[in-house]
Amino acid sequence: MVSLITSVKTIKAIVAGSFFIFIVLLILQLAYVFIAVGYHSLAADFPFLHNITGIFRYLIGLPVVLAVMFIGGYITADISDSREKIITVLHCFLVGFLTAGGMMYSAMDNSELTITGIVVTVLAIAACIAGGLYWLRNMTDSMLSTPVE
């Protein structure tokens, strides 16, 4: 019975973490499209802005994606409620791999994964695991600071 409850929590945690990341990233992509349209209309009047378009995308987009992945890992660890480090890392790795893999699969150029895509995928998985480990550390610290009656 305990195994079944653990399996349900695992599935629920992976689905919830992945769902959060997909929904938030889709909303942020929509916001990015609106910002990009405004940026390109502004760049029509100021040609020097064309040179920084690629840099702008990575300076703004990458930290936001990594923050969303971190929060998704935190949510995954919270729902799975596992106090074991290896289980928490495994859950967060699966969520990070599924979401980053789905994100990169849809963004691949001519079915080829670029170096940038590999770096973003590795960073996204690492951010998701870091979110889970952060949750685990907070739970460990709160358990240590709570007096035993």
Image: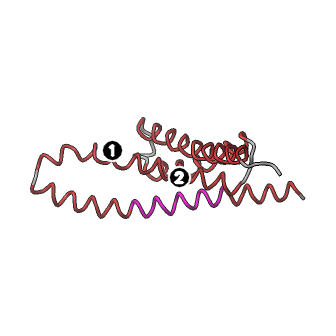
- In the picture provided, is 145 more to the left or to the right than 25? right
Q: Which x, y percent locates residue 132?
A: 62, 46
**Mark 2 = which residue?**
102
The kind of residue on which mark 1 rests is: Leu
Residue 74 shows which numbered tag? none
Answer yes or no: do the residues labelled 2 and 1 have beta carbons within 8 Å? no
Q: For residue 97: magenta?
A: no
Choose mark 2 or mark 1, whichever is in front. 1
Percent of width and height locating residue 137:
65, 42
Mark 2 and mark 1: Cα distance apart in space: 22 Å
The residue under label 2 is which amino acid type?
A: Gly
- Where residue 82 appears, x then y in whole percent? 74, 49
Residue 22 relative to residue 94: left or right:
left
Bounds of the magenta segment: 14-29
Apparent side of residue 108 relative to residue 78 in the rendered image (left or right)? left
Camera-nearest residue between 27 and 81: 81
What residue is shown at x 68% (from left), y 57% (from top)? Answer: 79
